Image: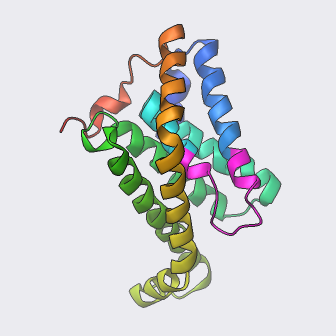
Amino acid sequence: MIPFFIRFERQVLNSHALVLIAVHAALAVAGRVAFASLPSVQATTFIIIMSGLAFGAEAGFMTGALAALVSNMFLGQGPYTLWQMFAWGMVGLTAGWWRQSRWMKSKPGKMIFGFCWGLLYGWILNTWFVLGFLEVSWKGYVMACVTSFSMDMLHALSNLFFLAFFSTSWLAIAERYKRKYGLFLDNSLEERGVAGG
């Protein structure tokens, strides 16, 4: 994760861009804390995906990493925080990389992307669980994934719901803000990702 933070730190961003990233990170935190009583059901991943799609890979990564770090100040920090920062950061990063692809410009494509990341997020966190609490083996990892499947599925389905009903209006608002202030017109990291289609 460190190279992404260093790269972001070296960027020259105006105050509007920084505020926009901070607002998305704050909303992602709220989207997790507000649903804390419902295991794995939250709007955080949806907001991180929106940040990556609207503002590019670097902004998406920062939104995801900050969302994990700050929300755990309310819900509890631990060794898992770094894994959550990485997983949610990658959600935003890949959304930014693929935002110009044909399938990510369609609502079904966004929904499939969000559903897949609901499962992938859990699998990444299961790696930390196996390393920290179980004998490291493929059997232990598969057992962890089977045990967490219902929670991971709830995460994936909540992503589907938010993307189905709120992604279009969210991106429209973000696009108007971008055009008004001329923000995120050059996302250099995104050029290294997968685009086209």
Residue at the image position 73 percent from the left and 46 percent from the top: 30
> In this image, 36 relative to 143: left or right?
right
**Could you say where residue 81 lies in the image, as x and y percent from the top left?**
65, 58
Tell which residue pokes out farthest to the right in this image: 74
Instruction: Tell me where residue 65 sits by quadrant.
Output: top right
Number of dots carrying numbers: 0
> In this image, 13 relative to 36: left or right?
left
The magenta segment: 29-46
Residue at the image position 26 percent from the left and 38 percent from the top: 101
Indicate the colouring scheme.
rainbow
Residue at the image position 65 percent from the left and 51 percent from the top: 68
Tell which residue pokes out farthest to the left in this image: 197
**Could you say where residue 29 lies in the image, as x and y percent from the top left?**
70, 46
Vertical placement of residue 97 versus 178, above or below? below
Vertical placement of residue 76 versus 26, above or below? below
Vertical placement of residue 104 versus 85, above or below? above
Instruction: Tell me where residue 177 sits by quadrant.
Output: top right
Q: Is residue 193 magenta?
A: no
Q: Is residue 115 visible?
A: yes
**Could you say where residue 69 lies in the image, as x and y percent from the top left?**
69, 48
Q: Is residue 34 magenta?
A: yes
**Could you say where residue 166 lies in the image, as x and y percent from the top left?**
54, 42
* Front in this rendered view, residue 126 or 54: 54
| Image quarter in which the C terminus is found | top left
Q: Is residue 4 visible?
A: no
* Front in this rendered view, residue 123 or 36: 36
